[in-house]
Image (cartoon, rainbow, N blue to C red):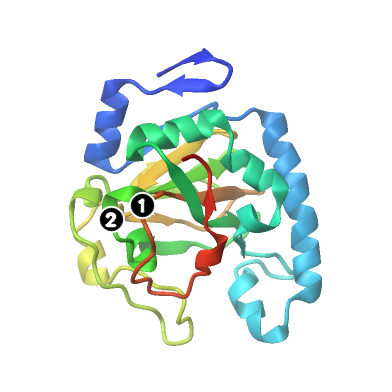
């Protein structure tokens, strides 16, 4: 893959083939370090404001319980609808060109998240399929662009993928009794599927198909592992049968 202008990264045919056969693809160097640092400063400010207003009944869902002795957010939802800097990243021509080369022309951001995963205890995310959460009208029309705001490594909780699971079905997920929103693949299915680590350097993007099994481990390092996940869909795709409620009004068309 090679950059042929400031705003375009061309994926080779072999890279596209890998995405469609394996279900994920890492592209380094989509953004530079200062772009990531600027985004981190913005989401840190937003996180402080969010914490100040967070009602007690929602704290268990947004606070990372793995970090002892301090209050650290686990995630924030829909930054593309709340923060101009995140929406600008979603519209970046380098990123959009990569997304469209994998799912087709004309895309929107339907849902997005910031993941914080703080040092020395940031919790894991169990294995799941995005398409179970979203229930899209076309399973091939959903792609997640997972942007590494810090270096994502084996030590600080990088993503793991089930290679080739994009070619299989969407499985029924389950949730722990005390965590109804934490939907995850059943162990009897997951135990049959090896999971491969996928470190991503700061400013790189990990793209994955909506059917691909993926998970992350705990952050056992002294460094942050922050990321911004933008869930793109082709413009003809809707979340028709989602497992959780989504605000369809937050869908933002990026290209026509």
Mark sitting earlier along the chain (2/1): 2
> Residue 18: image x %, image y %?
27, 32
The one of 242 and 66 positioned closer to us in this rendering: 242
Point 78% across, 75% down: residue: 53
> In this rendering, does residue 124 appear at all?
yes
CA–CA distance in space, label 2 to label 1: 9 Å
Tell me the element at label 2.
loop
> Residue 54: image x %, image y %?
73, 76
Crowd rating for badge 2 (residues with CA inside 10 Å; few <14, some 14–19, many 20+): some
Crowd rating for badge 1 (residues with CA inside 10 Å; few <14, some 14–19, many 20+): few
> Residue 226: image x %, image y %?
62, 49
The residue that label 2 is drawn on is 138
Q: Is residue 53 left or right of residue 129?
A: right
The residue that label 1 is drawn on is 236
State whether residue 35 is above or below residue 192: above
Instruction: Tell whether label 1 touches label 2 (CB within 8 Å).
Output: yes
The one of 21 and 240 positioned closer to us in this rendering: 240
State whether residue 45 is above or below residue 3: below
> Residue 85: image x %, image y %?
70, 44
């Amino acid at each position: 893959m090679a950059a042929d202008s400031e705003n375009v990264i061309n994926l080779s045919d072999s890279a596209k083939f890998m995405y469609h056969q394996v279900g994920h693809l890492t592209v380094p160097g989509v953004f530079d370090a200062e772009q990531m640092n600027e985004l981190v400063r913005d989401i840190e400010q937003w996180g402080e404001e969010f914490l100040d207003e967070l009602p007690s009944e929602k704290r268990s869902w947004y606070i990372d319980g793995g970090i002892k002795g301090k209050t650290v957010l686990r995630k924030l939802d829909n930054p593309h609808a709340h923060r101009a800097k995140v929406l600008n990243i979603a519209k970046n021509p380098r990123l959009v060109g990569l997304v469209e080369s994998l799912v087709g022309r004309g895309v929107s951001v339907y849902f997005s998240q910031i993941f914080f995963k703080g040092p020395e205890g940031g919790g894991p995310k169990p294995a799941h399929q995005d398409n179970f959460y979203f229930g899209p009208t076309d399973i091939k029309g959903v792609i997640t662009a997972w942007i590494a705001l810090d270096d994502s490594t084996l030590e600080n909780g990088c993503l793991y993928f089930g290679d080739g699971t994009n070619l299989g079905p969407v499985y029924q997920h389950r949730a722990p009794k005390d965590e109804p929103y934490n939907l995850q693949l059943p162990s009897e299915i997951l135990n049959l599927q090896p999971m491969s680590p996928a470190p991503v350097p700061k400013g790189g993007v990990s793209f994955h198909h909506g059917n691909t099994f993926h998970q992350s481990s705990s952050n056992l390092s002294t460094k942050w592992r922050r990321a911004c996940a933008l869930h793109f869909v082709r413009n003809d795709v809707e979340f028709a049968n989602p497992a959780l409620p989504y605000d369809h009004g937050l869908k933002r068309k990026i290209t026509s």
